Amino acid sequence: MASSAPATRPGHPWNDPALEPYIRIERVSKRFSGFVAVDDVSLNIYRSELFCLLGGSGCGKTTLLRLLAGFEEPSSGKISIDGLDMSGIPPYERPVNMMFQSYALFPHMTVDQNVGFGLKMEHRSRSEIADRVAQMLKLVRLSEFGKRKPEQLSGGQRQRVALARALIKQPKLLLLDEPLGALDKKLREHTQFELVNLQEELGVTFVVVTHDQEEAMTLSSRIGVMDHGKIVQVGTPQEVYESPGNRFVAEFIGSVNLFEGQVTASEAGHLRIVCPQLERPLDVLSGDLSAPQTRLWVAIRPEKIQLSLQAPQAASNWTRGLVKEIAYLGDLSVLLIRLESGQTVRVTRPNVWRHEEERITWEQEVYLYWHDSSPMIVRE
Ligand code: ATP
């Protein structure tokens, strides 16, 4: 899974306790006639971050975005932007621009006119408007489409017009609701990288709502994972993927194999766990201090399990199974392997060689093994 943005970004402002957050959300809840859509959320977002709110349908991410934009008022709690309390401040007086899921383009205007609309309202000169519209359309790869009307565009093209229109005024804070949902995979990837570059170039703070975890991983400086109106974890893409805070996050972000087990020995930095589904115990490098007898869940990502046709020599960290499915995806293959306990384990293998020497095939018995740093201890 690509995670380009954080690796290229210098420093982590959120690690500096002296830095003032740009957006401060303090114990915010939003209730709609008894239904709690946003539940006691506290969150700080810093200037120039590209922050993604990630979660399944109905978890409250759009509502949280609308609260930031001022289209909804919190039922309780407080939101400040750039040090100013936003209570009672209408959307048009907030330092915010929002791009909606439905993009709301003006049907009677051309693409050029739609994109330039905000500047026209500010009475900018014709030549400035034309220059900046051209710059924006180049960015979203629509330079040839300026004279068309929205109805003459595909869904993805309309979405890019909306993005250009939201960006042209170079807002300090841009809120995007599923901005790339209608784009095909290639274009989405291109636009994701463009968004990251643009964000770095302009220093705009972006808050993006998405249900697509790959998109969140690619775009974000940090991700806030939401479930049932609550923020369940905030972290860099690497943190939420490699150290999920609970079982929901582990399963929601990427694929995971989960095993229930019991701690049999625990010493500093190291746990021995017995899982009935696995042939051998797990020896896990972990900061977890669970005492012997503790029951817990162990998660191992599919790409962290290796396969062999020979039994490993180690006393721990391996098991055995039968290959039931193989899906060849070009860059990698996905294998579903059934253990003797009946549990199916998902393993991904990069196709490094064009022709494999040690071919693994259907119904073959294979050994699955992993490094002691690979298993993650997850809570309910
Ligand atoms: P999706 O990805 O499907 O857009 P979401 O996470 O953005 O989902 P929200 O739009 O924030 O979800 O909605 C959260 C919950 O609040 C949903 O159960 C929704 O039905 C409910 N909700 C949102 N707006 C209202 C409203 N105006 N009145 C009543 N319920 C609402």
Image: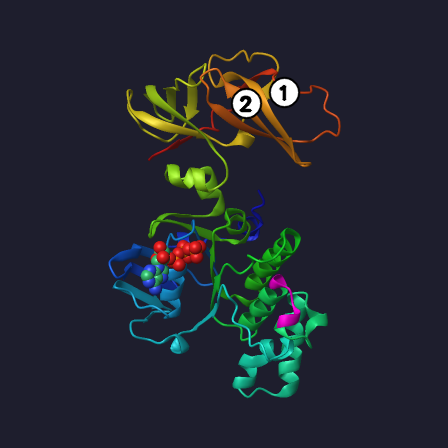
Q: Nearer the viewer, residue 21 or 11?
A: 21
Specify whether residue 45 is in view. no
Viewed as shown, does residue 39 lie left or right of 210?
A: left
Foreground of the two, 163 or 51: 163
Task: Name the side, left or right, on which 108 lies relative to 54.
Answer: right
The extreme front residue here reads 151
Q: Main secondary structure of the magenta part?
A: helix
Residue 170 lies within the magenta run: no
User: Residue 217 at what x, y percent from top left?
Assistant: 52, 48
Where in the figure is residue 150, as x and y percent of width and height? 62, 72
For marks 1 and 2, give the CA distance. Answer: 9 Å
Q: Amino acid at mark 2?
A: Ile
Asked if residue 154 is among those painted magenta in the image, a careful observer would answer: yes
Residue on which the image places disc 2:
337
Answer few, some or many: residues within 10 Å of disc 1's Cα (few below 14, many 20 plus, some between 14 and 19): few
Question: Disc 1 designates what residue?
Answer: 362
